[in-house]
Image: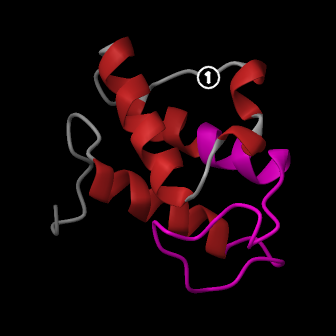
Amino acid sequence: MTDGTTPQHPDREHVMELITSVLTERPHLPDRLDETTTLDEIGMDSLDLIVVFSRFEEKWGVPYSEEETDWTVFDNLGHLADTLVARARTVGREPR
């Protein structure tokens, strides 16, 4: 949505926007990220992933557990976005 509102259910595009906006705030990550960017390539660690999951939870009300913060299971940022969208559908939560 271009009007600045949060969609009721997260879609891949909005989740990618959230991921890239969170990660560009981190000082050690490049400003330009896309769905093919690998987590290895940007040196992403579990702290970065916790920040992404926390912001996702704040925005869409989808909780996460510590077991889910293993960054090594994600091939790239697109895979992370797909996982978050699938998690939101499974949980079926409304946005906060």
* In front of the other: 70 or 18: 70
View extreme (front): residue: 75
Helix, strand or loop at mark 1:
loop
- Which span of residues is magenta-colored? 25-54
Determine which quarter of the picture holds residue 94. Answer: top left
Q: Residue at x 62, y 86 (%)?
A: 31
Estimate the x, y position of residue 73 in percent, counting from the top left.
Answer: 69, 38
Q: Residue at x 38, y 13 (%)?
A: 91
Q: Quadrant of the C terminus?
A: top left
7 relative to 76, above or below: above
View extreme (top): residue: 91
Q: Is residue 7 left or right of residue 62?
A: left
Q: Which residue is mark 1?
A: 64
16 relative to 95, above or below: below
Decide if residue 93 is in sight here: no
Does the magenta run of residues contain 30? Answer: yes
